Image (cartoon, helix red, strand yellow):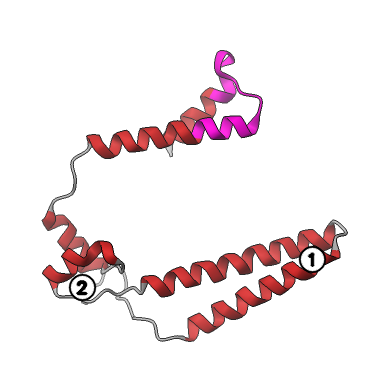
Amino acid sequence: MIASFIMGSVTSLVPALTMEDLGLRLMFITASVSSLWVIALFVTQPETEATLNEFYRQVRPGGPAWTKQRARNGLKPAQNLSLDLQRVAAGILQRFGFLLTTEGFLLGQPAIGWISLIVGVGGWMWLRQLNKSNALLMARPGSDRD
């Protein structure tokens, strides 16, 4: 985040590096910050197995990346990654559907407004259905409950 701020400031304020084209500036910032992220990934030491096991014991994330910690701790995940990803997709449909509905009607494009309204309502209904499913209960942060 700090690197993004610095790169954004440099491309806006330093006369020799100023980029007027916003698209070009965003691509440059994204590429440079991503490069810094990859460098930091290879330069820093990985977390110890004890740290990962303790993190898994407290958070119990879902997904295939935690198979080793799940086997060591003997705890089932407190999250259902598939259900969470479906909720994200439904939420995106809902948010963008309603956003584009407003835009379509305000800009005098009723076809886009109505189609977006249908998408938004569909996302809302899908999200309601997903929230009715049985989700695993997770302990409140800071409690020592397993």
Residue at the (21%, 65%) spot, across then down: 56
- Report crowding for label 2: few under 14, some 14 to 19, many 20 or more residues within 10 A (C-alpha): few
**Which label belongs to residue 125?**
none
Quarter occupied by the N terminus: top left
Separation of disc 2 and disc 1 at Cα?
A: 49 Å
At 54% from the left and 34% from the top, the residue drawn is 27
Name the amino acid, label 2.
Asp
Task: Tally the marks.
Answer: 2
Classify residue 67 as left or right of residue 72.
right
Quarter of the figure with residue 118: bottom right
Answer left or right for 70 relative to 139: left
Residue count near mark 1 (Cα–Cα under 10 Å), binned few <14, some 14–19, many ≥20: many
- The residue depicted at 31 percent of the width and 67 percent of the height is 63
Dot 1: what SS? helix
Q: Magenta stretch: residue 26 in it?
A: yes
In which image quadrant can residue 65 be found? bottom left
| Magenta segment | 11-29
The circle on residue 144 is 2
Q: Is residue 96 left or right of residue 141?
A: right
Q: Position of residue 114 (x, y in %)?
A: 79, 70
Q: Type of residue at label 1?
A: Gly
Q: Work out whether mark 2 precedes mark 1 in sequence or the reverse, and give the earlier one.
A: 1
Q: Please, what is the dominant secondary structure of the magenta stretch?
A: helix
Q: Relative to residue 30, is residue 146 depicted above or below? A: below
Q: Which residue is mark 1?
A: 113
Q: Specify the quadrant of the image occupied by residue 145.
A: bottom left
Using the image as rendered, state which of residue 146 and residue 92 is in the foreground: 92
Q: Along the line of sight, which residue is nearer the eye, 100 or 51?
A: 100
